[in-house]
Image (cartoon, rainbow, N blue to C red):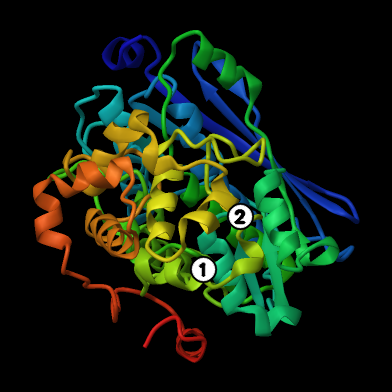
Amino acid sequence: MDFTSLREKYPTFIYHDYKISEDETTIKLTFDFEIVGLEHFAPTFTLKKRTDQMFGNYQQVDDAAFYLGMVELISYWKITCSPLVIIACHALDDYQIAWFKKLYFKGLGEFFYVNGIDTEMTTFMNIKADAQRINNLKTYDLSVKGNIICVGGGKDSFVTLDLLSEEYEDNHALVINKVQSALHSAIKAGYDNDKLINPQRTLDPRMLELNKQGFLNGHTPFSAMVAFASYFIALIYQKQYICLSNEASANESTIKGEDVNHQYSKSYEFELDFKNFVERYLDPKITYFSLLRCMSEMQITRYFAKLKAYHTTFKSCNVGSKQEIWCNNCAKCLFVYIMLSAHLNDKELDDIFHEDLLQKESLLKIFDELCGIDENKPFECVGTRDEVNTAICLAIKKRQDIPLLYRHYMESPNYVIYKDKDDYANFYNPQHMIPDHFLQILKAKGAIA
């Protein structure tokens, strides 16, 4: 089913409503979306509370719930890419409409690219939102303290957890849904029971069925959902900081020469946009930032290489996350293997992956994409081309027996360019929003100079 015909057949998408229901232990959000003439959807987001306080009658909580729905809707809109989106449950001003259109358009860059969709930000969607809600909601007198640390289960999460370990008493770890690798990573770092926040987000099965039938499908800006969900949770848990583990390399485009970034909603651009949005429309007492934004993948991996206790627990592979394994056949597995090979020996790598990925000829194409021999990177959360090349050359210097993929690399022009180059020994990315208190922690822990 193609973009143009679907838009003609299903021209209207409606965000009808959002509902907050709660009891003494749980608060649940239910969203009501419709592709007119095709299907209704009712995804949910359920959070266990830490007190029996009721939150649904506060303006900030109500607004945060609505905005989370504005991000959730993109997963359902993309089924038909309806040109008109009607927001029937809340007003939006011109700034907000432009803000969400930018998020949708850039966050769907990979979706458009993979599906061969040629469209523009000005024409891909028209948002109509002039509904006024009359209510008697109270203002939440928010008192905040401590950190929410978002945990995905990979090495970056463990670096952040370790860096903030001295603030443990005021920390909570956040894992959305029952992703076993992420849950076990949080527990390994000491975050279980009341220290672990584990909300459940459901996808409407009717969307999954339409995907099977051949309607449009593809990557959506998941990290933008995490941003709004973690903000909602910070309101309920009264936390001051939401700490992400996104690094400088998340800013690099996946498709060379084009503005198509698999990691757009992990980028500094989105982080800055989200900060501005919170300051204008939500409570700015809550601060969302990435602790590792000033660091490179090289520095993060070097730091993680010293955290030996976590080497057999962490899992960065999205393919194998549900089974809590490394699939050893994807771009993410190979990328992490390459980065760690600059700091760990072959025995240590085998203890983690149980296979030598650098001897697998089947990974040759992915290898070329990662290091820039093929100019387009894989659509995965991986580091920059420069970082990968630097790690490869450092790994080659450490080894007497050179594995297959590195022998292939030594025959490329990249090896000549990078073999004596290391721009990451004292790397520092000034484009970040890390509060001074946290910068001092990074310096004290030796993560940055």
Where residue 28 sits in the image (x, y, percent)?
76, 45
**Which residue has dot 1 on it?**
304
Left or right, 23 with reference to 109: right
Asked if residue 436 is positioned above or below residue 150 in the image, the reply reads below
Numbered circle sitting on residue 137: none
Look at the numbered disc 2 and give the secondary structure of its residue. Answer: loop
Residue shown at 61%/18% (left/top)? 206
Where residue 37 sits in the image (x, y, percent)?
50, 11
How dense is the environment of label 1, judged by Cα within 10 Å: few (below 14), some, or many (20 and up)? many
- Point out the tag, 2 or 1, that comes first from the N-terminus: 1
| Separation of residues labelled 2 and 1 (CA atoms) | 10 Å
Q: Label 1 near label 2: C-beta < 8 Å? A: yes
Left or right, 100 with reference to 177: left
How dense is the environment of label 2, judged by Cα within 10 Å: few (below 14), some, or many (20 and up)? many
Where residue 295 sits in the image (x, y, percent)?
37, 72
Numbered circle sitting on residue 314: 2
Q: Mark 1 is on which residue type?
A: Phe
